[in-house]
Amino acid sequence: MVAPNLNSKDYYQILGCSRDADESALKKAYRKLAVKWHPDKNPDSQEATTNFQKVSEAYATLSDPKKRQMYDQYGEEGVKAHEAGADMPGGGMGGFGGFPGGHGGGMGGMSPEEAQQFFAHAFGGGDPFGGMFGMGGMGGGPGIRFSSSMGGGGDPFGGGGFGGGDPFSAFLGGGGMGGSMRGSGMGGHGMRGHPGMRSSMPTVAKQYDVIPQGTIVSLKGLVNKSNLNGDRGVVKQYISQSKRYVVELEDSDETLSVKPENLLQHVHVRIHDIQSQPELNGETGTIITWCPDKGRYSIYVASLKKFVSLKPCNVVLDSGTVAKVTGVESKPELNGRWGTIKNWVSESNKYDVQLSSNQIIRLKVENMIL
Protein backbone atom coordinates (compact mmCIF):
# COMPACT_ATOMS: atom_id res chain seq x y z
CA MET A 1 0.00 0.00 0.00
CA VAL A 2 1.23 3.48 -0.91
CA ALA A 3 1.61 5.97 1.95
CA PRO A 4 -1.41 8.29 2.19
CA ASN A 5 -0.81 11.83 0.95
CA LEU A 6 -3.24 14.18 2.64
CA ASN A 7 -1.77 17.15 0.79
CA SER A 8 -2.86 15.71 -2.54
CA LYS A 9 -6.12 16.46 -4.31
CA ASP A 10 -6.20 12.95 -5.78
CA TYR A 11 -8.63 10.72 -3.89
CA TYR A 12 -6.53 7.60 -4.39
CA GLN A 13 -3.40 9.33 -3.12
CA ILE A 14 -5.27 10.70 -0.12
CA LEU A 15 -6.26 7.16 0.91
CA GLY A 16 -2.90 5.68 -0.05
CA CYS A 17 -4.43 3.26 -2.54
CA SER A 18 -3.61 2.35 -6.11
CA ARG A 19 -6.15 3.16 -8.80
CA ASP A 20 -6.96 -0.52 -9.20
CA ALA A 21 -7.61 -1.03 -5.47
CA ASP A 22 -10.67 -3.14 -4.73
CA GLU A 23 -13.48 -2.17 -2.39
CA SER A 24 -11.94 -4.04 0.53
CA ALA A 25 -8.64 -2.14 0.23
CA LEU A 26 -10.44 1.20 -0.03
CA LYS A 27 -12.55 0.38 3.01
CA LYS A 28 -9.55 -0.62 5.06
CA ALA A 29 -7.61 2.49 4.11
CA TYR A 30 -10.53 4.76 4.94
CA ARG A 31 -11.13 3.10 8.26
CA LYS A 32 -7.51 3.42 9.32
CA LEU A 33 -7.25 7.10 8.35
CA ALA A 34 -10.69 8.09 9.64
CA VAL A 35 -9.96 6.58 13.03
CA LYS A 36 -6.57 8.30 13.15
CA TRP A 37 -7.93 11.73 12.26
CA HIS A 38 -11.36 11.57 13.86
CA PRO A 39 -12.06 14.95 15.54
CA ASP A 40 -13.10 13.28 18.79
CA LYS A 41 -9.75 11.55 18.94
CA ASN A 42 -8.00 14.86 18.21
CA PRO A 43 -9.95 17.54 20.10
CA ASP A 44 -9.27 21.16 19.17
CA SER A 45 -7.20 20.16 16.14
CA GLN A 46 -8.19 21.90 12.92
CA GLU A 47 -5.67 19.75 11.04
CA ALA A 48 -7.44 16.60 12.18
CA THR A 49 -10.87 17.98 11.26
CA THR A 50 -9.65 18.93 7.79
CA ASN A 51 -7.95 15.58 7.20
CA PHE A 52 -11.02 13.74 8.43
CA GLN A 53 -13.12 15.62 5.89
CA LYS A 54 -10.62 14.82 3.13
CA VAL A 55 -10.49 11.07 3.74
CA SER A 56 -14.27 10.87 4.20
CA GLU A 57 -14.88 12.73 0.95
CA ALA A 58 -12.36 10.57 -0.90
CA TYR A 59 -13.89 7.32 0.32
CA ALA A 60 -17.44 8.56 -0.18
CA THR A 61 -16.64 9.07 -3.84
CA LEU A 62 -14.57 5.95 -4.49
CA SER A 63 -16.92 3.63 -2.58
CA ASP A 64 -19.76 4.49 -4.96
CA PRO A 65 -19.27 2.57 -8.24
CA LYS A 66 -20.86 5.23 -10.44
CA LYS A 67 -19.00 8.11 -8.82
CA ARG A 68 -15.75 6.17 -8.96
CA GLN A 69 -16.29 5.57 -12.68
CA MET A 70 -16.88 9.30 -13.19
CA TYR A 71 -13.81 10.14 -11.16
CA ASP A 72 -11.60 7.65 -13.00
CA GLN A 73 -12.74 8.95 -16.39
CA TYR A 74 -13.20 12.67 -15.80
CA GLY A 75 -11.60 13.46 -12.45
CA GLU A 76 -13.06 15.81 -9.89
CA GLU A 77 -15.08 17.70 -12.50
CA GLY A 78 -16.73 14.47 -13.53
CA VAL A 79 -17.88 13.86 -9.97
CA LYS A 80 -19.22 17.40 -9.72
CA ALA A 81 -21.13 16.93 -12.94
CA HIS A 82 -22.47 13.62 -11.70
CA GLU A 83 -23.63 15.24 -8.47
CA ALA A 84 -25.34 17.94 -10.49
CA GLY A 85 -27.11 15.31 -12.57
CA ALA A 86 -25.35 16.23 -15.80
CA ASP A 87 -25.99 14.10 -18.88
CA MET A 88 -22.82 12.04 -18.67
CA PRO A 89 -22.26 8.30 -18.83
CA GLY A 90 -23.41 6.83 -15.55
CA GLY A 91 -24.92 10.19 -14.54
CA GLY A 92 -27.56 10.59 -11.89
CA MET A 93 -28.25 12.26 -8.60
CA GLY A 94 -27.17 11.32 -5.11
CA GLY A 95 -25.01 12.35 -2.21
CA PHE A 96 -21.63 11.01 -1.24
CA GLY A 97 -21.47 7.25 -1.67
CA GLY A 98 -25.25 7.05 -1.81
CA PHE A 99 -25.35 8.72 1.60
CA PRO A 100 -28.59 10.67 2.00
CA GLY A 101 -27.99 14.39 2.17
CA GLY A 102 -24.44 14.18 0.90
CA HIS A 103 -22.76 17.36 -0.30
CA GLY A 104 -21.53 18.03 -3.79
CA GLY A 105 -18.25 16.60 -5.03
CA GLY A 106 -14.84 18.19 -5.08
CA MET A 107 -12.27 18.72 -2.33
CA GLY A 108 -13.66 20.72 0.55
CA GLY A 109 -17.22 19.94 -0.52
CA MET A 110 -18.02 17.80 2.51
CA SER A 111 -18.67 19.72 5.70
CA PRO A 112 -17.43 18.52 9.10
CA GLU A 113 -20.97 17.53 10.04
CA GLU A 114 -21.46 15.59 6.82
CA ALA A 115 -18.12 13.86 7.33
CA GLN A 116 -19.23 12.76 10.79
CA GLN A 117 -22.58 11.56 9.47
CA PHE A 118 -20.99 9.69 6.61
CA PHE A 119 -18.51 8.08 8.99
CA ALA A 120 -21.32 6.80 11.22
CA HIS A 121 -23.35 5.69 8.20
CA ALA A 122 -20.41 3.86 6.61
CA PHE A 123 -20.02 1.56 9.60
CA GLY A 124 -23.62 0.45 9.69
CA GLY A 125 -24.30 1.53 13.25
CA GLY A 126 -21.31 -0.33 14.66
CA ASP A 127 -18.51 1.16 16.72
CA PRO A 128 -16.05 2.38 14.09
CA PHE A 129 -13.22 2.46 16.61
CA GLY A 130 -13.24 -1.29 17.25
CA GLY A 131 -13.53 -4.54 15.32
CA MET A 132 -10.21 -3.65 13.76
CA PHE A 133 -8.54 -6.94 14.44
CA GLY A 134 -11.28 -9.44 13.69
CA MET A 135 -10.87 -11.11 17.07
CA GLY A 136 -13.55 -13.48 18.29
CA GLY A 137 -16.51 -11.86 19.95
CA MET A 138 -15.48 -8.40 18.92
CA GLY A 139 -17.36 -7.99 15.68
CA GLY A 140 -15.68 -8.42 12.36
CA GLY A 141 -13.95 -5.46 10.86
CA PRO A 142 -11.37 -5.34 8.14
CA GLY A 143 -8.30 -7.00 9.57
CA ILE A 144 -5.09 -5.14 10.09
CA ARG A 145 -1.97 -7.00 9.18
CA PHE A 146 1.06 -7.36 11.36
CA SER A 147 4.00 -9.03 9.72
CA SER A 148 4.90 -11.55 12.40
CA SER A 149 2.80 -14.08 14.24
CA MET A 150 1.79 -13.50 17.80
CA GLY A 151 1.64 -17.23 18.41
CA GLY A 152 -0.53 -19.84 16.71
CA GLY A 153 0.92 -19.51 13.24
CA GLY A 154 -1.78 -17.52 11.43
CA ASP A 155 -2.61 -13.84 11.16
CA PRO A 156 -4.55 -13.27 14.38
CA PHE A 157 -5.94 -10.02 13.09
CA GLY A 158 -7.63 -11.33 9.97
CA GLY A 159 -11.18 -10.38 9.12
CA GLY A 160 -13.22 -8.75 6.41
CA GLY A 161 -15.81 -6.11 5.85
CA PHE A 162 -17.13 -3.51 8.28
CA GLY A 163 -19.78 -5.96 9.41
CA GLY A 164 -21.41 -3.62 11.91
CA GLY A 165 -18.97 -4.77 14.56
CA ASP A 166 -17.16 -2.62 17.09
CA PRO A 167 -14.53 -0.88 14.98
CA PHE A 168 -12.88 0.95 17.87
CA SER A 169 -13.15 -1.53 20.71
CA ALA A 170 -11.29 -4.47 19.28
CA PHE A 171 -8.15 -2.49 19.58
CA LEU A 172 -8.20 -4.81 22.58
CA GLY A 173 -7.20 -7.95 20.73
CA GLY A 174 -9.06 -10.70 22.52
CA GLY A 175 -11.04 -10.83 25.70
CA GLY A 176 -11.76 -7.14 25.94
CA MET A 177 -8.99 -6.41 28.41
CA GLY A 178 -6.39 -4.63 26.35
CA GLY A 179 -3.91 -7.14 27.66
CA SER A 180 -1.77 -9.81 26.12
CA MET A 181 -2.72 -11.96 23.18
CA ARG A 182 -3.16 -15.66 23.69
CA GLY A 183 -0.14 -17.75 22.92
CA SER A 184 3.48 -17.00 23.54
CA GLY A 185 4.86 -17.83 20.14
CA MET A 186 7.10 -20.41 21.84
CA GLY A 187 5.17 -23.63 21.38
CA GLY A 188 6.80 -26.96 20.57
CA HIS A 189 10.25 -26.49 22.07
CA GLY A 190 9.99 -28.47 25.28
CA MET A 191 11.67 -31.77 26.14
CA ARG A 192 11.30 -34.39 23.44
CA GLY A 193 11.48 -38.17 23.46
CA HIS A 194 10.49 -38.53 27.11
CA PRO A 195 6.85 -39.63 27.33
CA GLY A 196 5.14 -38.49 30.48
CA MET A 197 7.66 -35.75 31.20
CA ARG A 198 6.55 -32.16 31.21
CA SER A 199 8.17 -29.52 29.07
CA SER A 200 11.09 -27.83 30.77
CA MET A 201 10.31 -24.36 29.49
CA PRO A 202 11.85 -21.71 31.73
CA THR A 203 9.43 -19.84 33.95
CA VAL A 204 9.34 -16.12 33.28
CA ALA A 205 8.44 -13.97 36.26
CA LYS A 206 5.35 -11.85 35.63
CA GLN A 207 6.04 -8.14 35.39
CA TYR A 208 3.14 -6.24 36.90
CA ASP A 209 4.51 -2.87 35.84
CA VAL A 210 4.86 -3.68 32.13
CA ILE A 211 2.20 -3.33 29.41
CA PRO A 212 1.69 -6.90 28.16
CA GLN A 213 2.84 -8.18 24.80
CA GLY A 214 0.01 -7.99 22.29
CA THR A 215 -1.59 -4.86 23.73
CA ILE A 216 -2.99 -2.60 21.00
CA VAL A 217 -1.82 1.00 21.27
CA SER A 218 -1.71 4.32 19.46
CA LEU A 219 1.39 6.47 19.23
CA LYS A 220 1.35 9.96 20.70
CA GLY A 221 3.73 12.78 21.46
CA LEU A 222 6.47 11.63 19.10
CA VAL A 223 8.81 14.45 18.09
CA ASN A 224 11.25 12.97 15.59
CA LYS A 225 8.53 10.96 13.87
CA SER A 226 5.54 13.17 14.49
CA ASN A 227 3.88 11.93 11.30
CA LEU A 228 3.28 8.63 13.07
CA ASN A 229 1.33 10.16 15.96
CA GLY A 230 -2.12 8.61 15.99
CA ASP A 231 -0.98 5.47 14.15
CA ARG A 232 -1.80 2.13 15.76
CA GLY A 233 0.39 -0.81 16.54
CA VAL A 234 0.89 -3.77 18.82
CA VAL A 235 3.32 -4.11 21.71
CA LYS A 236 5.86 -6.77 20.82
CA GLN A 237 8.40 -6.52 23.62
CA TYR A 238 9.54 -4.51 26.61
CA ILE A 239 13.27 -3.72 26.86
CA SER A 240 14.01 -3.31 30.56
CA GLN A 241 17.49 -1.84 29.97
CA SER A 242 16.15 1.11 27.99
CA LYS A 243 12.66 1.12 29.57
CA ARG A 244 11.14 1.22 26.10
CA TYR A 245 8.58 -0.83 24.24
CA VAL A 246 9.05 -2.31 20.80
CA VAL A 247 5.88 -1.58 18.85
CA GLU A 248 5.07 -3.06 15.47
CA LEU A 249 3.00 -0.70 13.35
CA GLU A 250 -0.26 -1.63 11.73
CA ASP A 251 -0.05 -2.79 8.10
CA SER A 252 3.72 -2.47 8.21
CA ASP A 253 6.92 -4.37 8.84
CA GLU A 254 8.24 -1.33 10.70
CA THR A 255 8.92 -1.42 14.43
CA LEU A 256 9.64 1.47 16.75
CA SER A 257 11.32 1.72 20.14
CA VAL A 258 8.90 3.85 22.15
CA LYS A 259 8.83 5.32 25.64
CA PRO A 260 5.77 4.48 27.79
CA GLU A 261 4.60 8.09 27.69
CA ASN A 262 4.34 7.84 23.89
CA LEU A 263 1.76 5.05 24.04
CA LEU A 264 -2.00 5.15 24.55
CA GLN A 265 -3.65 1.84 25.31
CA HIS A 266 -7.09 1.28 23.79
CA VAL A 267 -9.02 -0.56 26.44
CA HIS A 268 -12.61 -1.24 27.39
CA VAL A 269 -14.02 0.62 30.36
CA ARG A 270 -17.25 0.76 32.31
CA ILE A 271 -18.89 4.11 33.09
CA HIS A 272 -19.65 4.75 36.73
CA ASP A 273 -21.38 7.32 38.92
CA ILE A 274 -22.36 10.00 36.39
CA GLN A 275 -24.81 12.18 38.29
CA SER A 276 -25.76 14.50 35.44
CA GLN A 277 -26.37 11.68 32.93
CA PRO A 278 -27.33 8.59 34.95
CA GLU A 279 -28.35 6.77 31.78
CA LEU A 280 -24.65 6.38 31.01
CA ASN A 281 -23.90 4.44 34.20
CA GLY A 282 -23.13 0.80 33.53
CA GLU A 283 -22.44 1.38 29.84
CA THR A 284 -19.18 0.10 28.40
CA GLY A 285 -17.00 2.00 25.98
CA THR A 286 -13.60 2.22 24.38
CA ILE A 287 -10.96 4.76 25.36
CA ILE A 288 -10.08 6.73 22.23
CA THR A 289 -7.79 9.37 23.66
CA TRP A 290 -6.65 11.09 26.84
CA CYS A 291 -6.84 14.89 27.04
CA PRO A 292 -4.24 15.94 29.64
CA ASP A 293 -5.23 19.63 29.54
CA LYS A 294 -8.79 18.72 30.51
CA GLY A 295 -7.92 15.68 32.60
CA ARG A 296 -10.51 13.62 30.75
CA TYR A 297 -10.80 10.55 28.56
CA SER A 298 -12.66 10.64 25.27
CA ILE A 299 -14.68 7.42 25.19
CA TYR A 300 -16.82 5.95 22.45
CA VAL A 301 -19.97 4.20 23.69
CA ALA A 302 -21.02 1.84 20.92
CA SER A 303 -24.48 1.06 22.27
CA LEU A 304 -25.35 4.77 22.26
CA LYS A 305 -23.32 5.61 19.15
CA LYS A 306 -21.83 8.64 20.83
CA PHE A 307 -18.65 10.04 22.34
CA VAL A 308 -18.47 11.11 25.96
CA SER A 309 -15.76 13.06 27.76
CA LEU A 310 -15.26 11.69 31.28
CA LYS A 311 -13.02 12.20 34.27
CA PRO A 312 -11.00 9.18 35.46
CA CYS A 313 -13.17 8.97 38.60
CA ASN A 314 -16.11 8.03 36.37
CA VAL A 315 -14.24 5.39 34.39
CA VAL A 316 -13.58 1.85 35.61
CA LEU A 317 -10.66 0.17 33.84
CA ASP A 318 -10.82 -3.58 33.28
CA SER A 319 -8.97 -5.88 35.63
CA GLY A 320 -5.62 -6.76 34.09
CA THR A 321 -5.05 -3.30 32.66
CA VAL A 322 -1.60 -1.84 33.35
CA ALA A 323 -1.77 1.84 34.26
CA LYS A 324 0.37 4.55 35.84
CA VAL A 325 0.04 5.86 39.37
CA THR A 326 -0.47 9.61 39.52
CA GLY A 327 -1.63 12.29 41.94
CA VAL A 328 -1.09 10.36 45.19
CA GLU A 329 -0.36 13.01 47.80
CA SER A 330 -0.01 10.79 50.85
CA LYS A 331 2.71 8.67 49.22
CA PRO A 332 4.22 10.76 46.43
CA GLU A 333 6.99 8.18 45.93
CA LEU A 334 4.38 5.98 44.23
CA ASN A 335 3.65 8.52 41.50
CA GLY A 336 5.06 7.53 38.13
CA ARG A 337 5.09 3.82 38.91
CA TRP A 338 3.09 1.37 36.82
CA GLY A 339 0.95 -1.46 38.11
CA THR A 340 -1.69 -4.01 37.16
CA ILE A 341 -5.27 -3.40 38.21
CA LYS A 342 -6.39 -6.51 40.07
CA ASN A 343 -9.83 -5.51 41.27
CA TRP A 344 -12.27 -2.61 41.50
CA VAL A 345 -13.88 -2.01 44.87
CA SER A 346 -17.22 -0.43 43.98
CA GLU A 347 -18.11 0.69 47.52
CA SER A 348 -15.08 2.97 47.76
CA ASN A 349 -14.47 3.46 44.01
CA LYS A 350 -10.90 2.26 44.42
CA TYR A 351 -8.60 -0.25 42.72
CA ASP A 352 -6.43 -2.93 44.18
CA VAL A 353 -3.22 -2.42 42.24
CA GLN A 354 -0.34 -4.88 42.07
CA LEU A 355 2.99 -3.10 41.68
CA SER A 356 5.18 -6.17 42.09
CA SER A 357 4.99 -9.81 43.13
CA ASN A 358 4.86 -8.83 46.79
CA GLN A 359 3.24 -5.38 46.78
CA ILE A 360 -0.47 -4.64 46.34
CA ILE A 361 -1.88 -1.23 47.20
CA ARG A 362 -5.34 0.31 47.14
CA LEU A 363 -5.80 3.57 45.22
CA LYS A 364 -8.62 5.82 44.10
CA VAL A 365 -9.60 5.21 40.48
CA GLU A 366 -8.49 8.74 39.56
CA ASN A 367 -4.97 7.84 40.68
CA MET A 368 -4.55 5.29 37.86
CA ILE A 369 -4.12 6.78 34.38
CA LEU A 370 -3.32 5.08 31.08
Image (cartoon, rainbow, N blue to C red):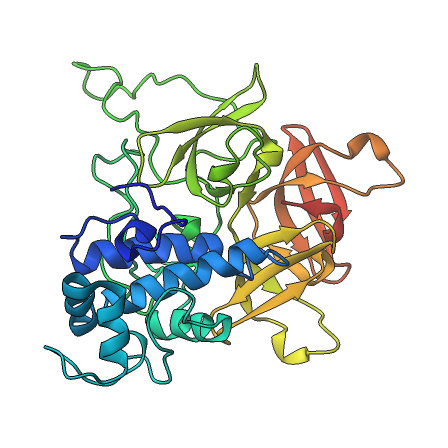
Residue 133 visible to an observer of this rendering: no
- Work out whether 245 lies above or below 366: above
Residue 175 x/y as whole percent? 41, 52
- Work out whether 20 lies above or below 1: below
Q: Quadrant of the N terminus?
A: top left
As rendered, which of 235 and 262 lies closer to the eye? 262
As rendered, which of 266 and 11 lies closer to the eye? 11
Residue depicted at 48% across the width and 55% down the height: 37
As rendered, which of 35 and 129 lies closer to the eye? 35
Residue 169 x/y as whole percent? 44, 58
Residue 363 visible to an observer of this rendering: yes
Residue 120 x/y as whole percent? 41, 72
Residue depicted at 34% across the width and 55% down the height: 9
Q: Quadrant of the C terminus?
A: top right
Residue depicted at 73% across the width and 59% down the height: 313
Q: Which residue is the extreme one toward the right?
A: 330
Q: Is residue 100 left or right of residue 224?
A: left
Q: Is residue 131 left or right of residue 86?
A: right
Residue 3 x/y as whole percent? 32, 41
Count all numbered tags in the image, as a single digit: 0
Q: Which residue is the extreme one toward the left?
A: 89
- Work out whether 204 lies above or below 303: above
- Work out whether 155 lies above or below 308: above
Quarter of the rendering containing residue 355: top right
Q: Is residue 10 left or right of residue 181?
A: left
Residue depicted at 33% across the width and 72% down the height: 105
